[in-house]
Image (cartoon, rainbow, N blue to C red):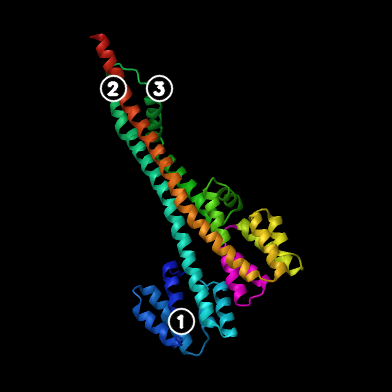
Amino acid sequence: MNIISPADLAFLNRQLASMVRLQTPLAEGFHVLAKESRGKHFQQILEGIHQNLASGKKLSQALAERPDIFPLTYVTLVEAGELSGDLSGALESMADYSETTLELRTSLFNVSIIPIMTSLVVLGVFSFIAVAVLPKFAEIFDSLGVELPLLTAIVLGFSNFMVSYTLEVLLGLLALVAFFAVSFMMRVRWLDWLLLNLPFIGMLLRTVHYTRFCMTVSHLLKHRIPLNKALELSQVAIGSPILRGAILDMKTAVENGKSLAEELRASGIFPETMAWKLAFAEKNGNLVEAFHELHRYFLQYFRMLVPRFVYIAAPCLVLIVGTGVGFIILSVFLPIFKLQAQLAGGG
């Protein structure tokens, strides 16, 4: 599957919106963008769209031929802009959408990479000392008749296990990583539930999903896509199978003439304040404004959560690293202290 980066897509959306606003020919514009592009793959994609436009196809039709890059939500919004005569507005909406999505992804990556890298470093240092250093000390202490302290004996037992079953341990770790990776890619519900309910991280993920849901529905409704269709398209943009199921239930409820806000509240997944605001919006007929305001609120809330997470995680990581390093140092030096005590006592 050919996929371009979120940064390239955000760049393309903003350029397209600018070209339409300035009333420049789109076919020629794609050709110019292709020549300007540094990536060969991205260049080929832009040239393909240029050729489709040059042959007389509409922009929505040209984009629809690349569903691996431009999802149905994107194509539907562009088509709605073409039909309403507000293609510039539709592309501006997609530019805002893709840039916000890029911001959310980048922030989540930056937040998650720090604890992951820290854990790997601590585990790597611990494993190296346990497997490569401590056994040599153990041989020396054994030859001197020094009984190893409990902490050192535990670490040495871990070392012996790792050395004796290296292949089995590596295969087991690979299988575990593969299991979680496949579960994540297949959007397994139990893993989704676990992630959404993790302390603080779950709050971050929920806020990302709420932001993308409200942002997608807001843009679609703004360009006169019916509410049930907007809900159907918005769930595609959500990575959580639990939330996707709840959104599809909302779509069914709307099609059956029921209240969107009541179904959203009944799901138990979305905040009560969100259901309350949407209930008033349904009565007043201003769902577009309500979803837009909710999108802005959740985005600002996410921006507030990220530095708070870093503020909380930093001392926790220092504590974890300090504990790990202290554990390793003690396991090495306790036998030395014990040997010194024996030599002093014997002296």
Amino acid type at mark 1: Ile
User: Is 117 covered by the magenta stretch?
Assistant: no
Contact (Cβ within 8 Å) of mark 2 with mark 1: no
Q: Which type of secondary structure does the marked residue at label 2 adopt?
A: helix
Location of residue 292 with respect to 191 vertically, above or below: below
User: Is residue 22 shown left or right of residue 36?
Assistant: right
Q: Which type of secondary structure does the marked residue at label 1 adopt?
A: helix
Q: CA distance from mark 2 to mark 3?
A: 14 Å
Q: Position of residue 213 (x, y in %)?
A: 59, 64
The residue at 47%/60% (across/down) is 105
Q: Earlier in the sequence, mark 2 or mark 3?
A: 3
State which region is magenta.
212-240
Q: CA distance from mark 1 to mark 3?
A: 68 Å
Is residue 194 something that shows in the picture?
Answer: yes
Q: Main secondary structure of the magenta part?
A: helix
Which residue does the numbered mark 1 point to in the structure image? 49
Which residue does the numbered mark 3 point to in the structure image? 150
